[in-house]
């Protein structure tokens, strides 16, 4: 199974999308970024359904950055579905959210999130968070083989 060096950004707030993309560029994270704006579109992309039916299921992103408060399908439900399916069970998922609700944090880890990052409101803090996120998950982290291998 091939792994693109792709980041899937699941975020419905256009300002947060632009801020994240800018932070990635500023820190020379050259990975392609696919942006989807709701949980249903994220699931369609990952499981090659709907508008993404022609995409190969073997080409999973290297990393999913997942907001929790999404239209159509909430982020926790997206995460639950990813962990239920063998194809995506080991896919690194980083929750990137403004939620400071303790139950969201606990539920994210209970459902198998690899990391939980609260979006800093401060621009400089956000830039630093994205820099560290890129360094760790895209450079240092070893990608797990697909489940069943």
Image (tube, rainbow, N blue to C red):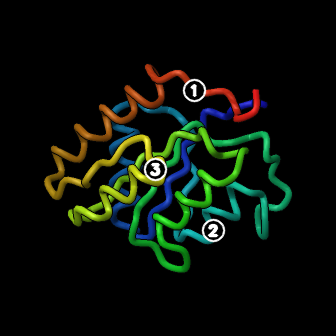
Q: Earlier in the sequence, mark 1 or mark 2?
A: 2
Please state, as top left, top right, bottom left or bottom right, where the N terminus lies in the image.
Answer: top right
147 vs 40, nearest the viewer? 147
Q: Earlier in the sequence, mark 1 or mark 3?
A: 3
Categorize mark 1 by other alpha carbons within 10 Å: few (<14), some (14-19), many (20+): some
Categorize mark 2 by other alpha carbons within 10 Å: few (<14), some (14-19), many (20+): many
Q: Secondary structure at mark 3?
A: strand
The answer to whether residue 124 is above or below residue 99 is above
Q: CA distance from mark 1 to mark 3?
A: 15 Å
Give the foreground label among 1 and 2: 1
When asked about the image quadrant of residue 132, the answer is top left
The label number, if any, that marks residue 143 in the structure image? 1
The residue located at (71%, 45%) in the rendering is 86
Spot the residue most to the front.
110
* Residue 78 in the image, given as x and y percentages of width and height: 55, 63
The label number, if any, that marks residue 41 in the structure image? 2
Residue at the spot of label 3: 65
Decide: marks 1, 3 in contact (CB < 8 A)? no
Q: CA distance from mark 1 to mark 2?
A: 24 Å
* Residue 134 in the image, given as x and y percentages of width and height: 39, 33
112 vs 78, nearest the viewer? 112
Categorize mark 3 by other alpha carbons within 10 Å: few (<14), some (14-19), many (20+): many
Q: From the viewer's perspective, is 53 left or right of 92?
A: right
Q: Earlier in the sequence, mark 2 or mark 3?
A: 2
The residue located at (45%, 63%) in the rendering is 11
* Residue 42 in the image, given as x and y percentages of width and height: 60, 62
The answer to whether residue 94 is above or below residue 66 is above
Q: From the viewer's perspective, is 2 left or right of 109?
A: right
The residue located at (18%, 51%) in the rendering is 123
The label number, if any, that marks residue 100 in the structure image? none
Q: From the viewer's perspective, is 114 left or right of 47?
A: left
């Amino acid at each position: 199974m091939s792994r693109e060096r792709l980041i899937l950004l699941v975020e419905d707030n256009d300002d947060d999308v632009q801020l994240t993309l800018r932070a990635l560029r500023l820190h020379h994270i050259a990975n392609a970024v696919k942006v989807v704006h709701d949980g249903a579109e994220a699931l369609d992309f990952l499981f090659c359904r709907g508008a993404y039916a022609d995409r190969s299921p073997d080409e999973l992103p290297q990393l999913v950055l997942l907001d929790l408060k999404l239209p159509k399908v909430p982020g926790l439900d997206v995460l639950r579905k990813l962990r239920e399916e063998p194809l995506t069970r080991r896919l690194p998922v980083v929750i990137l959210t403004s939620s400071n609700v303790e139950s969201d944090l606990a539920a994210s880890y209970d459902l198998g999130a690899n990391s939980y990052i609260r979006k800093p409101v401060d621009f400089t803090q956000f830039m630093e968070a994205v820099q560290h996120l890129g360094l760790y998950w895209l450079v240092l982290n070893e990608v797990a083989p697909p489940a069943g291998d």
